[in-house]
Amino acid sequence: MSNKIRVATTSLAGCFGCHMSFLDIDERIVELIEHIEFDRSPLTDIKHCSNTCDIGLIEGGLCNAENVHVLKEFRENCKIVIAVGACAINGGVPAMRNHFTLTECLEEAYLNGVGVDNPMIPNDVEIPLLLNKVHPIHEVVHVDYYLPGCPPPADAFMKVLTDLLEGKEPSLPKDILHYD
Amino acid sequence: MKPHHGLNTHTNLISNENSDHLYNNHLLHRLHDIQQQLHHIPKQSITDLAEELKLPVSQIEAAIDFYAFFHRSARGRFDIMFSNCTSCGDMTMMQYLCDQLSVMPGETRADGAVSISDASCIGMCDQGPALLINGRTITQLSNQRLDLIAEYIQDSTPLEQWPVEWFEVHDNVRKNGLLLSAPFEPGSGLLAAIKQGAESMLASIDDSGLRGRGGAGFSTGMKWKFCREAVGDAHYVVCNADEGEPGTFKDRILLTSHAHSVFEGMTICGYLIGAQKGYLYLRAEYRYMLPVLQAVLTNRQESNLLGTKILAQQDFNFDIEIIIGAGAYICGEESSLIESMEQKRGVPRVRPPFPVTCGYLGQPTVVNNVETLAAAAHIAVHGSDWFNAHGSDKSAGSKILSISGDCLNPGAYEYAFGVSIQQILDDCGAEDVQAIQVSGPSGTLIGPDEFERKLGFEDLATGGSFMIFGKDCDLLKVIQNFAHFFAHESCGFCTPCRVGTTLLRNGLDKICKGCGTQYDVDEMRRMAALVKRRSHCGLGQTAPNPILDALERFPELFNAKLVHSDYEPHFDLDAALEEARQLTKRDDAEAHL
């Protein structure tokens, strides 16, 4: 094992926009990769966290049982868990369904919606069951830091990671937090 | 001390609708009338009202959504609100009546006959449990009384035919002090002011050391002086009778049985600051007082104590109007109250400028508590020495306390400032006391080792609420009740308060449910500090007090409830899958968490 900082990432109920924004650090990733090594992540396609991860970046909130399992795996294996982006922090766009019951949502999508063929609510055991409401991740595990934004800008990812690499408390200057 | 029952009893079974000129065309009054007639405010009424009152539709809609007593969807023909206050509320009784009438709390029964919900403290803490039905107060509830209420509702018996004694509100004055025992001859204070001259009378008020009785304790003399000196097209006097702090009911007594001294205090203030108009902003829960107050105002007009050329003074004109609120605790804050007077949502203004220079309609305005104005009237008659001979150095005079909770004789007690908590407990017959909430949820929670502390601005400041919790009381539930109160009453204007009070409420709910960890306690402490420091107005700045006080003085309450793990989810994960299990008829291992 190298002594690089191990970073795991995942997207739960998110759109991968935060990951895309992370990749907007562009060529800076070359230097970053000198100091970090990606563990479980859509970028590596590693399926499970090794138990020595330092940082877990979590995009998206919790909308189904699988999200909960993944989140718990991250919490158990990462020293630091960071909620990345609006959905992980507040539920975001997926949480708009919280204004309706799950029954209403599924009936609209699979039974009563326009153009539905062969109406039935999917019940294959391969499909993770939906939670009745979408939740931000800090309602299920302890979150160490929050990286806000929809998505957080690449500079914000860089700032948080470099702060942590330098052994500092991550802190975002106002110009990175200010969106209008 | 031998407690005695207050002699003055008033029933509030009166017609709400009143065309009297003292009941003006204010938006809140109009909305109240529509709500009573149609059980909600329909869209058409909003547009009609907007046209008639020349107000934007958005402003009327905002008001409807802001004030607890207005609804966009239909409430029942009998619309009941149970107080949820720890002193004058009883949520088990609400559930009991809901069961009797087959209606869910917060909902309207399908036949439109009845709706039942809860409301913040309705000021009947000495004679609860209590409820409001179509805006009228019923006190001293019991299950037997609720059975009868259920019958009357099932039979659609109009309120006018319900037993009159149910609507009685007693004064329950248990201990008379400086103000409550002093006789008051209407006009005597005004005569003294005129005789003495405005400048000199203002100096008297200042010398008396009178400080605001709402709790903040700003010097009354100074406030009046600032307002008198402020330049404006008109000056206004506002009496803040939006007594909303849970556990407070002393203004109820002053307004019912000492209204002359309150109105005279307003009139004297008008004379001193050069105002021609005064307003009494009355909380909606006290609407039943309207006829009594109007009668006093009419009487004062007939006696030339209000109106034009008062007491034959050529240029002394002053009149008083009553504005009735619509269920919003925040309107007790003076700048929100002024917003509400201006027919808007009760959202606090940025201060400065303070109302003394820029208040009602942007003009110099004095806003004083009911008790302050009554005290000022007495000071005008008896002089400043009479007043500051009582009390302590920094807290002159007396304070009327509203005592409720676990004691033999709840009611109003008037003490000179400087009285010890223990003395008060002895007088009201409270034994085995676990804790006292002094000055309401926004005040201070103290335990037995602080009962030698004294009431006064230099030690325990108070707006008058004094809630006693005996040793058998679940104090954490009380704190939880207060957290719910603040989350409900936050006006929503600033984020620290709007979001923070809700997070504090959620945190306490989690702990009370037995799912909280030390982490949740630490988070709550952090959040409490943030809400206190960053909120826009006094509501948010004081909302975390009960939690912080309880954490400091009664940490064992929390510890006893905590789960000893690093972290517990905020909700039951497996239960959150139940709806999906039902829909998919799955029960395999993957269908559980």
Image (cartoon, coloured by chain):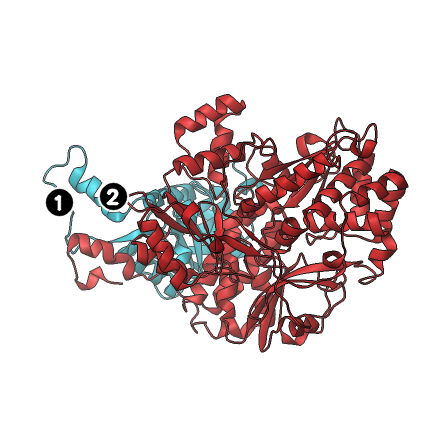
Chain colours: A cyan, B red
Q: Are marks 1 and 2 on the same chain?
A: yes
Q: Amino acid at mark 1?
A: Met
What residue is disc 1 on?
A120
Q: Amino acid at mark 2?
A: Cys
Q: Tag 2: Cα neighbours inside 10 Å, few (<14), some, or many (≥20)?
A: some
Horizontally, residue A50 falls left or right of residue B418, namely left
Q: Tag 1: Cα neighbours inside 10 Å, few (<14), some, or many (≥20)?
A: some
Q: Residue at x 76, y 33 (%)?
A: B275
Q: Chain of mark 2?
A: A
Position of residue B324 measured from the top left corner of the image (x, y, whole percent) = 57, 40
Quadrant in the rendering for residue B361: top right
Q: Chain of mark 1?
A: A
Position of residue B95 measured from the top left corner of the image (x, y, whole percent) = 36, 59
What residue is disc 2 on?
A105
Q: Residue at x 80, y 58 (%)?
A: B396
Q: Is residue B138 at all visible to an observer of this figure?
A: no
Number of marks in the rendered image: 2
Query: What is the secondary structure assignment of the residue under circle 2?
Result: helix
Q: In the image as oriented, which residue stretches furthest toward the left?
A: A118
Position of residue A170 measured from the top left corner of the image (x, y, whole percent) = 54, 54
